[in-house]
Amino acid sequence: MKQSVQSLEDTYKQILTTFLQQKNEQGLYEAQQFSKVLLEQQIAPEELVSVHREVLESLFPSVSNDVIDSLDLLLEIMMGYGLAYREHQSLRDRQRELESEIKVAANMQQTLLPKEKPDVDCLDIGVISVPAAQMSGDYYHYITDDHQCVGVAIADIIGKGVPAALCMSMIKYAMDSLPEQRLQPAALLENLNRVVEQNIGDDMFVTMMYGSYDPRTHDFHFAGAGHEPGFLYRADRDRFEELFAKGIALGVSRKPTFREYHRKIEVGDMIVFLSDGVTESRIGDRFIERSEITSLIKDSMHLSAQEIVDNVYYELAKAQEFLLKDDFTLMIIRRKV
């Protein structure tokens, strides 16, 4: 409960009197404790100046008018300062609330990402996803059916913060709720587009690459929605090919058409999905070339898929002094047998 003005004056008068008489550390300690009381009870700076003026006149009736006038001037200054200080406090409290909300959303994002990679005998899968800030606009997802067919998705939500986290949540649950289409890339993107277009604002949209791998036949079908082209490494030729899938970003058009592509995957071949945070990595004052990314992958070709993506991230992050300009997500799927 806030102290009355009289009670505040009495307390301060006692502290001031003790200090003026003793002028020791104990007096300063009592003043520090009193300042905590002022903060707890939200006593404005100008209120304390006014109390000081009243107490001073009470203790020293003969104090000069100049001193009293100087306190009146200080009171006017403190009124302006007090208003600015309270506004600052309000903004700081709001910032703390926003930081708390962002932390909750960031934690929610982590729960949306897969906890484990698909366990398929013929595949070696590696993925790394690192946000540039506390929250990420990148998302990836795995789905495995009863035949061990694997669906993989990588997406970039154009929009940041809490709205991106909410959109990410919507995409995950939309994908999980479409079991009959989830391993048909073009059909899945059409269904996702309907969900995204109806539920997000005009200032947001989603790019995505989605593919399905059948370990029985080693056929890989994929479709894209305005996403960064991936790569396909052909082991027999020791060469990378562009893995481009034409299609408009999700949420832009009401009834888009997505084209489905097909590749046969041989032993040693690698499918590479990535976000534009990888291709837009900087080396000095220039963006990295796509050929430099494939060179980094080839340098680690003797390692596991997870070690490859970890090494590529480390080299590109190091080139940027570990200050990412955009979210970084890289996924590699390699056929082992």
Image (cartoon, grey):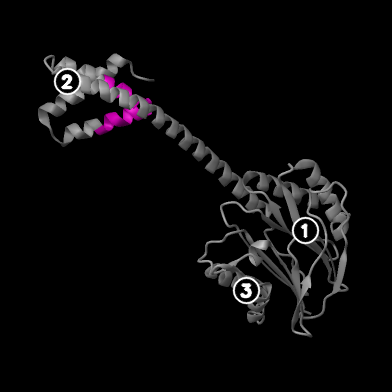
Decide if residue 10 is on the left or right side of residue 124. Answer: left
Residue in front for this viewpoint, 273 or 113: 273
Q: Is residue 173 magenta?
A: no
Amino acid type, mark 2: Asp
Q: Position of residue 54 (x, y in %)?
A: 23, 16
- When asked about the image quadrant of residue 232, the answer is bottom right
The image quadrant where one finds the N terminus is top left
Residue 136 location (% of width, % of height) = 62, 54
Visible in this render: residue 329? Answer: yes
**Percent coordinates x, y for residue 256 in the rendering:** 87, 52
Q: Main secondary structure of the magenta part?
A: helix
Element class at badge 1: loop
Q: Read off the residue under disc 1.
A: 226
Disc 3 target residue: 307
| Residue name at image x 20 percent, y 34 percent | 28
Q: Which three-letter amino acid code belongs to the residue tagged 3?
A: Glu
Q: Which residue is drawn at 63% across and 64% down?
A: 280
* Residue identifier under label 2: 66
Instruction: Examine the structure image and report whether residue 41 is included in the region drawn in magenta.
Output: yes
State which quarter of the image contains the C terminus. Answer: bottom right
* Type of the residue with mark 1: Gly
- The boundaries of the magenta stretch are 32-50
Q: Which residue is located at x 50 percent, y 39 percent?
A: 95
Closer to the chain start, of discs 1 and 2, is: 2
Q: Which of marks 3 and 2 is nearer the N terminus?
A: 2
Secondary structure state at the residue bearing disc 2: helix
